Amino acid sequence: MKRFAALFLSFLLLLTGCGSPVKETTPASTTAEPTISATVPTTVSTEPTPTEPAPTETTPAVLSPEPSDSDFVRIADYLPDIRFSLPYATSENFTGQVIYDFTDPWLRYGTVKKLMAVYEELSKQGLSLLIWDGFRPVSAQFTLWEVCPDPTYVANPETGYSSHSRGNTLDLTLTDQSGTPLEMPTGFDDFSKLADRDYSDCTETAAANARLLQNVMETHGFSGYFGEWWHFSDTESYPVEETFTPVSPVWLYADCNEFITLRTQPDTSADAITRIPKNGEFQMLARSGDFAYVDYEGLQGYVLLSYTQPVE
């Protein structure tokens, strides 16, 4: 009878599972790793599966690559609070005619970095800057010489271009934080001896302001032209630019089969920044030979003009 009872009890335990071997309660992360061939890295289980979709090539980069020091850039893209008024973009200048048709000043990136240091120092003194001229295309220099063939004030493009055409020179003055110009020896493009850096023939206030501007500019890597208190050149020189020309912004779209490539330089072998899909729209800011310098969704670079069309 006892043997029968023991057998019956065992039968019940098997039915309920309680008689099964005790399972491991160790967390899965501490269990032994599965057997892996010695030629396969043990980290293989953490790699994405082959079916995981890869990013498409048309996905734009987050940021444009930083320009090289010799690249041309718009000053306002790096000093958005700086003020500028370009007389040569209007007829309100000593020639009485429009010299160029763009309204944003451009400089070499290396020069802009120095200008940023000037702006920061002046801001601490409650002052700011007003820019009258920056990069000046070679064609504009010929126009200026035709109107004023005086090498004291205008460089003769037949014998040597203006430093403005190198992209490292600008004309500017001091203002207060509200943008009101401070008193200076003369106004812009005053072709008289009053405009030189002698400062003995102007008021003490004007002389002090002109010296302040000169000292801060020279501290951060600029040198001034004696005949014009407003004229400063980067001590780092660059070659005269004969192909790059800013333009009034115009909207274009990609006229292509699939995409056009936005590149870091006006060269088909230059590094690609991103791809602009067919019919994608962008703003043209300048031209360099067969290329347009454009802004596409915050990315700036060059595209071939032959694959673009104006947006109607």
Image (cartoon, rainbow, N blue to C red):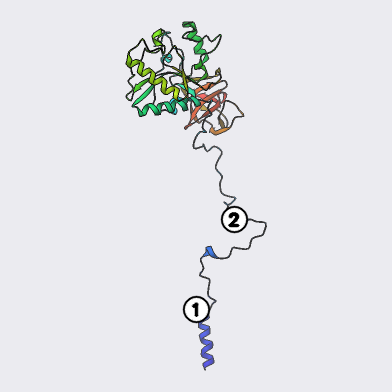
Which residue is the extreme one toward the front? 200
Earlier in the chain: of badge 2 and badge 1, it is 1
Residue 251 at what x, y percent from top left?
A: 47, 25
Q: Residue 51: give x, y in percent of width and height.
A: 58, 50
Give yes or no for contact between labels 2 and 1 (Cβ–Cβ under 8 Å). no
Between marks 2 and 1 in the image, the one whose residue lies nearer the viewer? 2
Residue with the most extreme bottom position: 1
Amino acid carrying label 2: it is Thr
Q: Amino acid at mark 1?
A: Thr
Pointer 1 local density, CA inside 10 Å: few below 14, some 14–19, many at least 20: few
| Label 1 residue SS | helix
Q: Which residue is mark 1?
A: 16
Q: Is residue 1 above or below residue 252?
A: below
From the viewer's side, name the closer residue of 276 and 209: 209
- Quarter-of-image position of residue 229: top left
Q: Secondary structure at mark 2?
A: helix
**Residue drawn 39% across and 18% down?**
211
- Asked if one can make out residue 258 in the rendered structure from this viewpoint, the answer is no
Q: Which mark is residue 43?
A: 2
Query: Which residue appears at 41% of the width and 23% of the height?
Result: 216
- Between 59 and 193, which is closer to the camera in this rendering? 193
Q: Please tell me how crowded label 2 is: few (under 14), some (14-19), or many (20+) other residues with Cα within 10 Å.
A: few
Residue 76, x across and y down, in percent: 43, 26
Q: Is residue 15 above or below residue 85?
A: below
Q: Estimate the spatial distance between the alpha carbons at disc 2 and disc 1, rounded to whole Å.
A: 41 Å
